[in-house]
Amino acid sequence: MNNSRKPFLALDADIDSRLERLAEEKGVATMVKPSDQAGEGGRVALKAEPKVDPESIPTPRAHMKNFSIEIPDYVWRELKLRAFHRGTTIKHVIMTSLKAEGFEIRNADMIEDGRRDRVSNE
């Protein structure tokens, strides 16, 4: 058995400040004690969250569906050529066609290059 693991750090009075520093380094929201926010009558005043337009949030991958169809090879080539000339993906060409046909597709789901925005940890 390999006992080369570092032992857990002991909890001490400085744990709050160390956790707050770590949270700040990692980009986690800061901890605020409820007594610091207590207003009249000891009640905590909650800050209103900014309203987010659901149209601006792409559909999560867990809610995406795959489908497979058979199409003639000349249609496949045309799809690939259109995607190439537009600088998009085949999926975007198909979604654009569906939208033009009257299907409701959110603008946030019209991702041209197939990559979703990633939150960087820098």
Image (cartoon, rainbow, N blue to C red):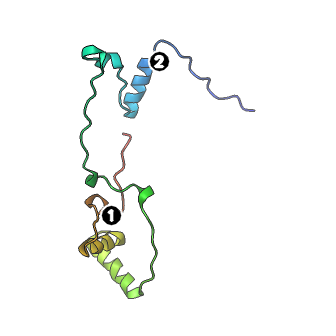
Q: Residue at x 31, y 60 (%)?
A: 109
Sequence-wise first label, 2 or 1? 2
Q: Position of residue 41 (x, y in %)?
A: 27, 14
State the SS at label 2: helix
Q: Position of residue 89 (x, y in %)?
A: 34, 69
Q: Quadrant of the N terminus?
A: top right
Quarter residue 119 falls in: top left
In the rendered image, the vertical position of residue 36 relative to residue 1, given as above or below: above
For residue 95, the mark is: none
Toward the front, the furthest residue is 41
Q: Position of residue 51 (x, y in %)?
A: 24, 42
State the SS at label 1: loop
Toward the right, the furthest residue is 1
* Residue type, mark 2 in image: Ile
Marks 2/1: CA–CA distance: 45 Å
Residue carrying label 2: 15
Toward the top, the furthest residue is 13
Q: Quadrant of the C terminus?
A: top left
Residue carrying label 1: 113
Q: Residue at x 26, y 76 (%)?
A: 101
Pointer 1 local density, CA inside 10 Å: few below 14, some 14–19, many at least 20: few
Q: Position of residue 105 (x, y in %)?
A: 29, 65
Quarter residue 8 falls in: top right
Q: Residue at x 62, y 23 (%)?
A: 7
In the rendered image, the vertical position of residue 122 relative to residue 32, given as above or below: below
Image-based side of 28 in relation to 112, left or right: right
Pointer 2 local density, CA inside 10 Å: few below 14, some 14–19, many at least 20: few
Q: Residue at x 25, y 33 (%)?
A: 48
* Residue type, mark 1 in image: Asp
